[in-house]
Image (cartoon, helix red, strand yellow):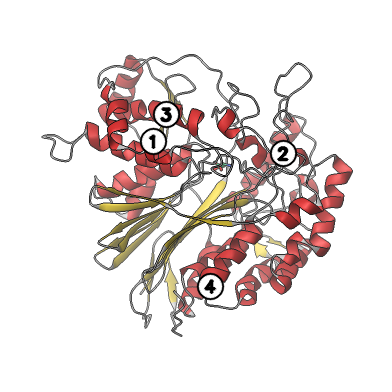
């Protein structure tokens, strides 16, 4: 992973997939990124001989500038790393502030106060991104930290050209804030943005320079820390100097399990995602054995129903057993045990829906996190998912520091039996405690075959992340799709609550939709996710970014 080979590459990029000219490298490298700025910077780092982690760090900071919906230094995330020597999971998830407590979002009557965990400074967990990137760099970086930060500094200082989809997202968000009468300062910073114009962020540039020049101390201590804490104090927020100074990103052992001839490396708790996708994939395989006479047709009524049934069981486990493993003993092995899953799958009726209690759905408002995948010329891979939770996080920009604060506290369970914005339930395992990490659905995932990277995937989308990820895997492994087909193929999601609702993309066949409705499902046609996928087929890379977003995928030869 520390190898550096100086090589040159000239890129000819077409939207979504790419061709390149000669790259005097050991083998192909590839990136699948949520926007063109991050893709170009990551490709340039790889072409200078940087490794996958170098490219990921540079891309993460670029996204903090050019993808304010989700890119961040005010949030957190997970980075899954595979090298020929080890697999690693860098957990830079936010934590609850020291003054946080279990009932902090409840009123005198013990009811959840609407929006308190979603907008404004009280919704923010202590940010983890800068510490996470630093830890990744300390362990795996081969290029100078400063050189990895500089592209982001330049884009913030000199500006970048605003993509029409960013301008649309901002105007949608401003309308939303106004309609719902939500008082945040987002408009002061982003209100004037126009598609096609250059947008500069001088305060963010200064924050990034402090990180560039002083590493994590340039964020968790000194001027940026002072600005954050002053802002908190002015608005009744909880994050203190002590919270910032004590924040630590940690390295965890990824979940690693065999499945259908692959080794699946994926996110351990405090993500629910790794357990969830493996439960889903394993139960699917138990119910549709590989040697079945007739495999299910992709996205047919039977396929959707079967996976929805599995989803009910997955999400029931998620609500009861999952939380931060440093605070709650998560029974990972039992939840992935084949016999346990066999029993769980045993009562799936292929013709009828199993019963669920009625539970009020969550708000299901806008969603934005972001994911990217990288493979370098040595076959190392990074799958990185990062978030400030909802689109534009808490809606609060730290004045003078120029970055948006997350609203990740909503991923905790504010009260047992009450769904969060993603409709997810939780209890003791995921209740708020000081310094605890809130349960996540982010699922950066890598599949190995014969010890080589075979697939790198991940997506945003709150709880729907899990469906986007396991379906991207099935699309490739079961249905032989290319990267572009796999990311653009219609997906669907069911998560126990709301009762019997299947959320789906456009593109399911009318006859299948009718049949599902006749079975008793309610169909909710709304997009979710933004998958960025790299596949390796016998040494040939294929990269795809979902066409609906503003992503860009490239293979460097
Ligand atoms: O960690 C989680 O599961 C959520 N905070 C992710 C939020 C998300 O993916 C939002 N949108 N697309």
User: Distance from label 3 to label 2 (Cα)?
Assistant: 27 Å
Image: 327 above or below 194: above
Image: 224 above or below 489: below
Instruction: Give the crowd class for mark 3: few <14, some 14-19, many >=20 residues within 10 Å.
Output: many
Whether residue 162 can be seen here: no
Instruction: Give the crowd class for mark 4: few <14, some 14-19, many >=20 residues within 10 Å.
Output: many
What residue would you read off at disc 1? 335
- The mark that comes first in sequence, 4 or 1, is 4
Q: Quadrant of ligand 1?
A: top right
Q: Secondary structure at mark 2?
A: helix
Numbered circle sitting on residue 489: none
- The mark that comes first in sequence, 1 or 2, is 2
What residue would you read off at disc 2? 123
User: Distance from label 4 to label 2 (Cα)?
Assistant: 33 Å
Q: Secondary structure at mark 3?
A: loop
What residue would you read off at disc 3? 494
Residue 45 horizontal/vertical position (percent): 51, 74
The residue mark sitting in front, 4 or 1, is 1
């Amino acid at each position: 992973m520390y190898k550096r080979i100086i090589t040159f590459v000239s890129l000819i990029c077409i939207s979504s997939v790419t061709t390149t000219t000669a790259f005097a490298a050991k083998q192909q490298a590839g990136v699948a990124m949520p926007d063109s700025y991050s893709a170009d910077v990551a490709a340039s780092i790889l072409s200078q001989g940087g490794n996958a982690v170098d490219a990921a760090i540079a891309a993460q900071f670029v996204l903090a500038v050019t993808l304010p919906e989700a890119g961040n230094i005010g949030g957190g995330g997970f980075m899954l790393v595979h090298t020929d020597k080890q697999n690693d999971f860098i957990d830079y998830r936010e934590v609850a502030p020291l003054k946080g407590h279990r009932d902090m979002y409840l009123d005198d009557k013990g009811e959840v106060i609407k929006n308190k965990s979603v907008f404004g400074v009280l919704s923010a967990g202590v940010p983890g991104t800068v510490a996470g990137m630093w830890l990744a760099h300390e362990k795996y970086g081969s290029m100078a930290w400063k050189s990895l930060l500089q592209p982001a500094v330049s884009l913030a200082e000199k500006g970048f050209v605003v993509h029409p989809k960013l301008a649309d997202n901002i105007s949608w968000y401003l309308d939303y804030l106004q309609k719902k009468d939500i008082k945040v300062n987002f408009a002061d910073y982003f209100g004037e943005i126009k598609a096609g114009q250059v947008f500069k962020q001088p305060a963010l540039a200064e924050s990034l320079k402090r990180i560039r020049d002083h590493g994590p101390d340039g964020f968790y201590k000194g001027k940026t820390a002072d600005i954050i804490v002053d802002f908190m104090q002015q608005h009744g927020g909880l994050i203190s100097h002590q919270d910032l100074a004590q924040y630590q990103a940690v390295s965890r052992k990824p979940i690693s399990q065999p499945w259908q001839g692959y080794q699946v490396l994926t996110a351990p708790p405090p993500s629910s995602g790794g357990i969830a996708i493996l439960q889903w994939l394993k139960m699917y395989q138990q119910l549709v054995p590989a040697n079945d006479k007739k495999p299910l047709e992709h996205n047919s009524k039977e396929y959707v129903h079967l996976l929805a049934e599995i989803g009910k069981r997955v999400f029931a486990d998620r609500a009861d057993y999952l939380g931060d493993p440093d605070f709650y003993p998560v029974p990972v092995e039992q939840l992935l045990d084949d016999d346990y899953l066999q029993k769980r799958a045993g009562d799936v009726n292929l013709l009828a829906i199993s019963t669920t209690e009625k539970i009020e759905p969550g708000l299901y408002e806008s969603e934005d996190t972001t994911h990217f995948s990288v493979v370098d010329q040595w076959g190392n891979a990074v799958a990185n998912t990062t978030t400030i939770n909802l689109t534009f996080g808490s809606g609060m920009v730290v004045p003078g520091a120029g970055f948006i604060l997350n609203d990740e506290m909503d991923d905790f369970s504010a009260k047992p039996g009450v769904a969060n914005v993603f409709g997810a339930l939780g209890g003791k395992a995921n209740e708020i405690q000081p310094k605890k990490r809130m349960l996540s659905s982010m699922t950066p995932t890598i599949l190995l075959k014969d010890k080589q990277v075979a697939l790198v995937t991940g997506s945003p989308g709150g709880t729907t992340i899990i469906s986007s990820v396991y379906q991207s895997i099935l699309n490739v492994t079961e249905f032989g799709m290319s990267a572009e087909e796999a990311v653009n193929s219609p997906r669907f999601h069911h998560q126990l609550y709301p009762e019997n609702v299947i959320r789906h993309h456009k593109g399911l066949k009318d006859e299948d939709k009718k049949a599902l409705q006749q079975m008793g499902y309610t169909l909710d046609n709304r997009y979710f996710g933004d998958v960025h996928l790299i596949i390796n087929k016998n040494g040939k890379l294929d990269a795809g970014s979902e066409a609906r977003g503003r992503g860009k995928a490239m293979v460097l030869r």
